[in-house]
Image (cartoon, helix red, strand yellow):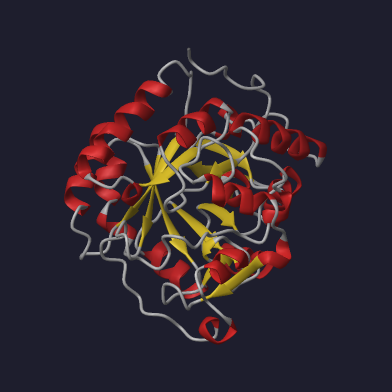
């Protein structure tokens, strides 16, 4: 799970996580709240990318066990599949202990921690040879995660869909590389293979690509969401804290349909992530999207989107040793 890699700026070093030479491009299909499920993970792996999902997307613990089983069966015929989960590690999260037991049983390559210190899962994940990454939105947060022993940092930059950062990747990567030599992932409006290559040149190892895959039929979203993505572009994305209490990027049309006006969007809402699947949650009918949404022009399959991204990546000078594998694994019958 750990592979030596060129970091894009002239050096070779150890990169904790998926074996890059088993991927067609250094892309992690990001774990997206209420979007990513087992089919998105399976098809990402079959397309030569890293699939992932947030564990809270499974409404019940039994659902989560079923998802893990489906993913394991769906990638069983692949020679070296890589997949990841995002996991809430805050002490108030009721399913934490039970989920950690599942992690040790099913052994995802990467566990991405959210809303708490990565140290809470390090021993268990390292015990089976996995890597622990931490979501970070500031340099201070990145330092704390690095000091806590994270193998990798996911830099959530300005332009990301859903919970979004405020920092430019140009500054963020440089600041983090001053004190952290581990794996760096960059998320935030990465929607083309050219952008994936640019992230490498900045000094990062992988790209988080989320919005570009939301409209794919393998995602969990409804047709209204898909149609809205296809007809939206950069001008149709609004960043506001009014919905969840923290800054998020949403499709403006969905905000308007839900009754939010300019005055509402200027004020911060209340933070409340209890009962995340509840029928009365404000985000139930408000749709997240990053600033790269303009790259979506159809509800194409994940395999087709991945092919386009890989072609763009190679054309932009991407490392041939990363993308030298087969075009993609055919879907299992």
| Residue 17 visible here | no
Total count of labels: 0
Q: Split into 4 quadrants, where in the image is the N terminus?
A: top left
Vertical side of 64 occupied by 159: above or below: below
Vertical side of 209 occupied by 1: above or below: above
- Which of the pair 225/138 is nearer the observer? 225
Rendered residue at 47%/78% (across/down): 242
Rendered residue at 68%/49% (across/down): 230
Q: Position of residue 292 (x, y in %)?
A: 68, 56
- Which of the pair 318/330 is nearer the observer? 330
Q: Position of residue 14 (x, y in %)?
A: 52, 43
Q: In the drawing, does residue 83 fall left or right of residue 101?
A: right
Q: Quadrant of residue 269?
A: bottom left
Vertical side of 94 occupied by 332: above or below: above
Q: In the drawing, does residue 152 fall left or right of residue 230?
A: left
Rendered residue at 53%/18% (across/down): 331
Q: Position of residue 21 (x, y in %)?
A: 59, 29
| Residue 222 visible here | yes
Rendered residue at 31%/45% (across/down): 58
- Which of the pair 154/210 is nearer the observer? 210
Q: In the drawing, does residue 16 fall left or right of residue 304?
A: left
- Which of the pair 146/155 is nearer the observer? 155
Q: Position of residue 160 (x, y in %)?
A: 58, 61
């Amino acid at each position: 799970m750990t592979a030596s890699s060129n970091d894009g700026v002239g050096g070779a070093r150890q990169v904790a996580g998926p074996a890059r030479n088993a991927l067609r491009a250094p892309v992690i299909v990001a774990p997206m709240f209420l979007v990513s499920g087992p089919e998105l993970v399976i098809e990402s792996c079959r397309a030569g990318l890293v699939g992932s999902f947030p564990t809270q997307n499974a409404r019940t613990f039994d659902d989560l066990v079923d998802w893990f089983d489906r993913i394991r069966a769906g990638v069983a015929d692949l020679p070296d599949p890589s997949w990841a989960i995002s996991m809430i590690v805050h002490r108030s999260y009721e399913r934490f202990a039970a989920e950690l037991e599942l992690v040790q049983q099913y052994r995802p390559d990467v566990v991405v921690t959210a809303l708490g210190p990565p140290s809470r899962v390090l021993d268990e994940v390292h015990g089976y040879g996995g890597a622990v990454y931490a979501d970070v939105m500031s340099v201070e947060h990145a330092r704390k995660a690095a000091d806590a022993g994270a193998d990798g940092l996911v830099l959530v930059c300005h332009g990301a869909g859903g919970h979004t950062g405020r920092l430019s990747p140009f500054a963020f990567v440089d600041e983090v590389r001053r004190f952290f030599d581990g794996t760096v992932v960059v998320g935030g409006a990465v929607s083309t293979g050219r952008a994936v290559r640019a992230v490498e040149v900045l000094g990062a190892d992988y790209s988080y690509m989320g919005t570009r895959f939301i409209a794919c039929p393998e995602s969990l979203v409804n047709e209204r969401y898909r149609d809205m993505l296809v007809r939206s572009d950069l001008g149709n994305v609004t960043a506001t804290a009014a919905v969840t209490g923290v800054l998020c990027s949403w499709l403006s049309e969905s905000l308007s349909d839900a009754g939010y006006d300019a005055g509402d969007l200027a004020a911060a809402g209340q933070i409340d992530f209890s009962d995340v699947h509840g029928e009365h949650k404000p985000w139930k009918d408000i749709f997240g999207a990053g600033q790269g949404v303009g790259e979506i022009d159809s509800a194409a399959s994940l395999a087709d989107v991945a092919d386009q991204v890989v072609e763009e990546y190679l054309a932009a000078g991407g490392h041939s040793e990363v993308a030298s594998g087969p075009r993609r694994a055919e879907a299992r019958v």
